[in-house]
Image (spheres, grey):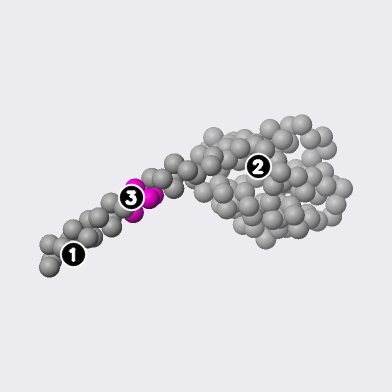
Amino acid sequence: MLARVVRLMRNKETNELVAMKYIERGRKAINCVDVDVALRQCVPYITGQAPNPAKGCCDGIGHIKSIATTKADRQAACGCMKAAASHLPGIVDSAVTALPAKCNVPLPYPISASVDCSK
């Protein structure tokens, strides 16, 4: 009986590992189109045209936080944001820095025009 339980446990552990591999393999990498779409509604706020970020902007910040779970994800999202910002005139740096607090979406990393995405 004990041998059967051990065999079942080993099979369960193996199945869990295989499932985790497939989940990881099927996981979509962050791309700049997704980041741009998620943050599109932030443009009026970060360019000083709106006093507060729109709900859609804050939802986008939350979405990026939820999908950028690894260091590589965060670096990719950061690079996408910096690339988009370089094509957007009139960005107010203090608005960008304040965005997580204004949206009540705490981030474990700072966001700014000068942030080093490699860290």
What residue is at 75 percent from the left and 45 percent from the top? Answer: 40
Nearer to me, 105 or 7: 7
Label 3, label 2: how many angstroms apart (C-alpha)?
Answer: 29 Å
User: Tag 1 or tag 2, which sits nearer the N-term?
Assistant: 1
Nearer to me, 55 or 89: 55
Judge whether 28 appears above or below 3 on screen.
above
Nearer to me, 36 or 94: 36
- Looking at the rendering, the stretch of residues picked out in magenta corresponds to 16-20
Q: Indicate which label's residue lies in the foreground, 2 or 1.
A: 1
Name the quadrant of the N terminus: bottom left
Question: Looking at the picture, which amino acid does disc 2 mark?
Answer: Asp
Q: Determine the secondary structure under disc 1.
A: helix
Q: Determine the secondary structure under disc 2.
A: helix
What residue is at 51 percent from the left and 39 percent from the top? Answer: 72
Question: Looking at the picture, which amino acid does disc 1 mark?
Answer: Val
Picture coordinates of residue 91 (x, y %)? 79, 40
Does the rendering let one see residue 81? no
Count residues near mark 3 (Cα–Cα under 10 Å), then give few for <14, some for 14-19, many for 20+: few
Contact between labelled residues 1 and 2, with CB atoms less than 8 Å apart: no
Count residues near mark 2 (Cα–Cα under 10 Å), then give few for <14, some for 14-19, many for 20+: some
What residue is at 66 percent from the left and 42 percent from the top? Answer: 35
User: Tag 1 or tag 3, which sits nearer the N-term?
Assistant: 1
Count residues near mark 1 (Cα–Cα under 10 Å), then give few for <14, some for 14-19, many for 20+: few
Picture coordinates of residue 7 (x, y %)? 18, 58
User: Tag 2 or tag 3, which sits nearer the N-term?
Assistant: 3
Does the rendering let one see residue 66? yes
| Disc 1: which residue | 5
| Disc 3: which residue | 17
